[in-house]
Every structure is written in C-alpha cells, then in structure tokens.
Image (tube, grey):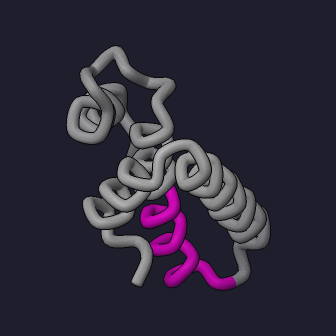
Amino acid sequence: MYLTPEVKQQIFAEYGSGTADTGSAESQVALFTHRIKHLTEHLKQNKKDLSTKRSLINLVGKRRKMLEYLKQQDIERYRAIIKKLGIRK
C-alpha cells in the first residue's frame, strides 16, 4: 500500500507540529496533497478508472476547502504551506 502508517507519521512530523498532530490544517493539506499526487500518477496509466477519478475530484475539493479555511484564519500559515508544498503558482 502506498500510504503506510510510517509515511503518515513522516508527513505529520514534517508539516504539523509533531507526529501526533493529525488534526492541524497544514498536516491535513499535506496528506491530501500526497494522496492527490498518487492518484494522479495512477490515472495517467489507467485512464478509464472512473472511481479513482471521482475520488481524485473529491480529494481536490476537500483540499481546496481546507486551504480556503486556512486562508481565512491565518494568511501567513496559508502562504507558508502553499510555498512548502508548491501547489499554487
């Protein structure tokens, strides 16, 4: 499986305030981004996989809502996570 507990711990440690910080907006956005990248690579090889395409669209929507929330709460945290992940131009 592509998303093992060790990978999750690493993502939470890098983008959150620690390995137990699974609820912060930054760590959730980072986890969504990791999953989106994986699903995008899968869909490049399997173009007709409609259930994965639907999952990808849902994840992108969740990440967009989470980023919008973060932007409204604290613009500096939003800018920092965008720059760190490199997801906006």
Residue stretch in magenta: 35-47
Viewer-side residue, 31 vs 68: 68
Q: Residue at x 51, y 50 (%)?
A: 32
Q: Please identify the quadrant where the N terminus is shown.
A: top left
Q: How many numbered tags mark residues here?
A: 0
In the figure, is residue 42 to the left or right of 82?
A: right
Q: Please identify the quadrant where the C terminus is shown.
A: bottom left
Residue 64 appears in which quarter of the rendering? bottom right
In the displayed orientation, state which residue is furthest to the top.
Answer: 20
In the figure, is residue 17 to the left or right of 56?
A: left
Spot occupied by residue 28 in the image (x, y as percentages of width and height)? 49, 40
Q: Is residue 35 above or below residue 83?
A: above
Q: Is residue 45 magenta?
A: yes
Spot occupied by residue 36 in the image (x, y as percentages of width and height)? 51, 62
Viewer-side residue, 9 vs 66: 66
Q: Residue at x 72, y 67 (%)?
A: 57
Q: Residue at x 44, y 45 (%)?
A: 31
Residue 56 appears in which quarter of the rendering? bottom right
In the figure, is residue 65 to the left or right of 25?
A: right
Q: Residue at x 32, y 32 (%)?
A: 16
Viewer-side residue, 12 vs 47: 12
Q: Is residue 31 above or below residue 20?
A: below
Query: Is residue 8 at least partly visible in the picture?
Result: yes
Spot occupied by residue 3 in the image (x, y as percentages of width and height)? 40, 41
Q: Main secondary structure of the magenta part?
A: helix
Q: Is residue 65 magenta?
A: no
Query: Is residue 1 at least partly visible in the picture?
Result: no
